[in-house]
Image: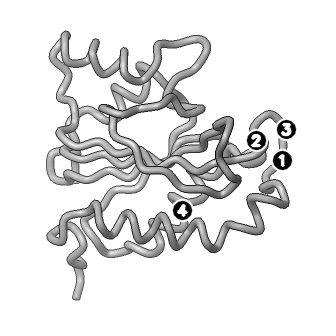
Amino acid sequence: MNKSDKNVLVLGVGNDILTDDGIGPKLCDFLKNKYEGTELIFEKLNVGGLEILEFIQGYKTVIFIDAIKTSGGNIGDVYLFTPNDFKETLHLSNLHDTNFITALELGNTVGFDIPENMFILAVEIKEDMVFSEYFTEELASRYQDIKMKVLNILNELIPNEFLIAEKL
């Protein structure tokens, strides 16, 4: 099926070989298994800025799952943002590209088919600059709780008609 046949994209953003930075892709894999047989599309991406814009065009709803490092957060905290109250996450912008909000504005200006609904699930992390396929001990100890929080938030965000299994 093409994008026009599917209207909800869950996008795990991050690099799964940079310690905690891989939380987005790993949660995306977990959720893909949980929602198998539904109308949802799950993808992983390790780019930001304008490249994300091109990837999400044509979808009605996009739910990003990404890592974040804040000054006052606790490792494993899960935040829900929309572009209207957006605080930059680690991947929705990068040093060599434009930030996510600027990319959205540019996309609107040039006529991209921008999603009507966008949500950012951001997980507070500790380390994102060390090469490792494994989370830090602090994040790993909270991973089961994080999965359940993200699953609960996703269940609230996704319209019921997309949760009906294709094969009964």
Along the viewing direction, whichever of 65 and 53 lies nearer the viewer: 65
Asked if the residues shown at circle 2 and circle 3 are in contact, with their CB atoms under 8 angstroms apart, the answer is yes
Asked if the residues shown at circle 1 and circle 3 are in contact, with their CB atoms under 8 angstroms apart, the answer is yes
Q: Residue furthest bottom?
A: 168
Amino acid beneath label 4: Asp
Q: Quadrant of the C terminus?
A: bottom left
Checking the image for residue 18, the label placed there is 2
Checking the image for residue 141, the label placed there is none
Asked if the residues shown at circle 1 and circle 2 are in contact, with their CB atoms under 8 angstroms apart, the answer is yes
First reached walking from the N terminus: tag 4 or tag 2? 2
Checking the image for residue 132, the label placed there is 1
- Discs 4/3, front: 3
Q: How many marks?
A: 4
Along the viewing direction, whichever of 77 and 134 lies nearer the viewer: 77
Identified at 42% across, 50% down, the residue is 80
Checking the image for residue 29, the label placed there is 4
Amino acid beneath label 3: Val
| Residue 51 point in image, percent of width and height | 43, 24
Checking the image for residue 130, the label placed there is 3
Q: Quadrant of the N terminus?
A: bottom left
